[in-house]
Image: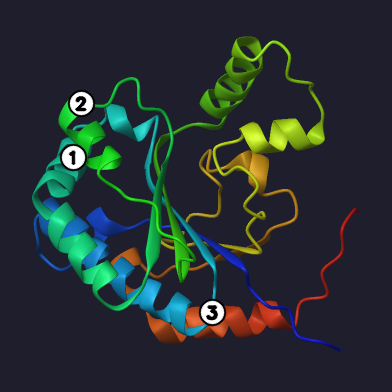
Amino acid sequence: MSLNKVNHLALIMDGNQRWASINKKNKLEGYLAGLNNLKFIIDKCIEKKIKNLTVYALSSENIKRASSKIIFNLIRDKHKEFLKELLKKNIININIIGEKTNISKDILNIYKSLIKKKNPTINLNIVFNYGSLDEIIYIVNNFIINKNKKINKNSVRSSMYLGNIPDPDILIRTGGYQRLSNFILLNLSYTELFFTNTLWPDFSHNELESILLKFSKVNRNYGL
């Protein structure tokens, strides 16, 4: 039996605030620890030759919470350092996936500063201010604007936020909850789901390696 290879890994990075509470840190320190761990996990994905990594940073529901201000300030303060470290060793494409209508101009300008790279080592898709119904509305509006565009599976697919990037092979959710929380539902039809109690800042290379090994041995079926 040939082992399954991972082309696209999706992550719900849950547990930053609980990690901060357990470790007697403030919420900002919890999110910063989560951001630092993302850099380590990206390195591991590159090592394993995983071409696409999609991570859930903020849902459209969570943007209404007070803690979202911490995330926005973290982006403002740390994005240059984060990008510098990521791009120092590898060619990485960073795509921001989600609604942009209620995002402040300075954050949108940071999005616009992300330059597309040719032949990237990895595509990092950051799912931010995202909701699946919002994505469906985005797709429908795309067809309304482009009236001559035929509606079929291929055109719908190309209109989705992730476009023609293959669906995730694996979804890992940290933090103990076993739910999808409105995360790229249109792309998860046959994704293998893994849940761990580990809080995101503590999610290690070794645990990722263990999950990848389990996935490699899964008998993947398409259909019931």
Instruction: Please state the horizontal and vertical placement of residue 171, each as a whole percent of the image.
Output: 58, 60
Q: Quadrant of the N terminus?
A: bottom right
- Which residue matches tag 2? 104
**Number of the label disc, if any, that sits on residue 187:** none
Q: Are marks 2 and 1 in contact (CB under 8 Å)?
A: yes
Left or right: 150, with 205 as reference point = right
Colour basis: rainbow
Using the numbered discs, state the Cα–Cα distance from disc 2 to disc 1 in whole angstroms.
9 Å
Q: Secondary structure at mark 1?
A: helix
Tell me the residue that label 3 is attached to.
Answer: 49
Q: Is residue 20 visible?
A: no
CA–CA distance in space, label 3 to label 2? 35 Å
Tag 3 near tag 2, CB within 8 Å: no
Q: Residue at x 27, y 26 (%)?
A: 103
Point out the tag, 2 or 1, that comes first from the N-terminus. Answer: 1
- Does 144 sit above or below residue 56? above
The amino acid beneath tag 3 is Lys
Asked if labels 3 and 1 touch by Cβ distance under 8 angstroms, the answer is no
The residue carrying mark 1 is: 72
Please tell me how crowded label 2 is: few (under 14), some (14-19), or many (20+) other residues with Cα within 10 Å.
few
Callout 2, which amino acid? Ser
Residue depicted at 69% across the width and 58% down the height: 191
Tell me the distance, in whole angstroms, between the alpha carbons under discs 1 and 3. Answer: 31 Å
